[in-house]
Amino acid sequence: MKKILVTGSLGQIGSELTLHLRDKYGADAVVASDLKDGKGSPLAEGGPFETIDVMDAKMMAEVVAKHKIDTIIHLAALLSAVGEKNPSLAWNINMNGLVNALEVAKEYNCKFFTPSSIGAFGPSSPKDNTPQDTIQRPGTMYGVTKVAGELLCDYYFKRFGVDTRGVRFPGLISYTTPPGGGTTDYAVDIYYEAIKKKAYTSFIAEGTYMDMMYMPDALNAVSTLMEADPAKLIHRNAFNVTAMSFEPSQIAAEIKKHIPEFKMEYDVDPVRQAIADSWPNSIDATCAKEEWGFKAQYDLASMTTDMLEKLREKLA
Ligand code: NAD
Ligand code: SER
């Protein structure tokens, strides 16, 4: 991984993953890119930045050739709730963008990473400790594109030898860039509102368990998987990874330990609740642990302490 291109780098994951990779491999070794221009963003100020629409394969190929890219981290996609508002756009960006990126990786012999999601599971998947290999019949367009994307990445490895790798991320919690319209966003919003208003109205119902992970663990998961010995990777793509599983009243209780006046109310959004109900309560990350040593550092308590501390500084 001498020269890395990150697509969708201005999003929740990319804005931190680009900096994480620049810390590890050097500022000039990581080219940030997004559909939006990077003006004023620390990514454009701290290293190379290119505007790329992933729907334009030629544009992507030109940047890859220009910077002699050997690794593509493909993040540009629409998330679950936004995808349900505009399913055909979600199909277009998530699938055609991915095919374009895989084609460029094939042509320029690049290593390739793209994330799948807990959204690749559906109501007929086992709900608890969902296995790595199991039934996947998701009910959202987001999930449909994620399952198809997992299969495509396997296909490009087997058929063309592209070194594809990936994980199924759970809901990611972070303080740098707000999430882009997912079902798990409540678990980020709650921290902002706890500091600003000492109260939060959750759009996800009490008792709804979903897997989650703090961003530092997600960043480490990407770099560890990309550096893993390929001979040990049985699955390669779509590894289940998780750090914790909780439901809204548990995160509220954890916040209350720091902000005793904090109040939680519920005003459930039927669309996002239906998505959450179709996802696992918890997934099994044994394959990621065994095949490339995945390990999360943060649990709900340590994440909450850090999130509140960092957000207090940010919002001060
Ligand atoms: P995000 O919505 O925060 O960011 C996506 C970025 O892609 C945005 O900056 C957007 O401008 C860019 N983009 C959109 N259309 C584009 C196009 N046509 N060309 C180039 N860029 C375009 O998303 P994220 O949370 O950073 O997610 C990144 C990836 O990780 C996605 O594949 C997502 O499905 C996956 N994922 C995220 C989570 C999570 O909790 N954040 C969980 C599981 C999987
Ligand atoms: N956080 C993402 C979403 O809710 C999970 O893929 O869409």
Image (tube, rainbow, N blue to C red):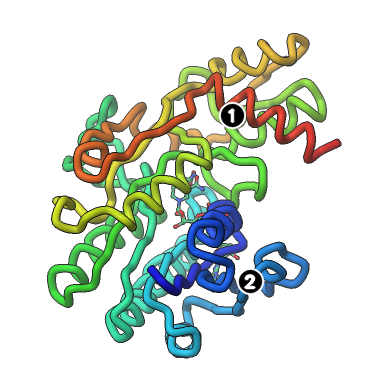
234 and 223: which one is in front? 223
What residue did someone put label 1 on?
A: 268
Nearest the camera: 227 or 219? 227
Q: Is residue 110 above or below residue 153?
A: below
| Amino acid type, residue under disc 1 in the picture | Val
Q: Give the quadrant of the C terminus.
A: top right
Can residue 278 be seen by looking at this rendering? no
Q: Residue at x 57, y 70 (%)?
A: 32
Q: Amino acid at mark 2?
A: Gly
Q: Considering depth in this image, is 89 or 216 the residue closer to the camera?
A: 216
Q: Quadrant of the N terminus?
A: bottom left
* Residue assigned mark 2: 47
Residue in the picture at 38% in, 79% down: 100
Residue 166 percent coordinates (x, y): 32, 55
Q: As drawn, is 207 to the left or to the right of 120?
A: right
**Residue occupying the far right of the picture:** 316
User: Which residue is rendered at x = 50% and y = 59% of the image?
Assistant: 21
* Image spot of residue 227 (x, y percent): 32, 56
Image height of 111 relative to 241, above or below: below
Sooner in the amino-acid sequence: mark 1 or mark 2: 2
Front of the two marks 1 and 2? 2
Image mark count:
2
Mark 1 residue CB less than 8 A from any atom of ligand 2: no
115 with respect to 301 (left or right): left
Front position in the image: 45 or 242: 45
Residue at 48% from the left image edge and 28% from the top image edge: 298
Give the distance between the C-alpha atoms of the residues marked 1 and 2, in whole angstroms.
42 Å
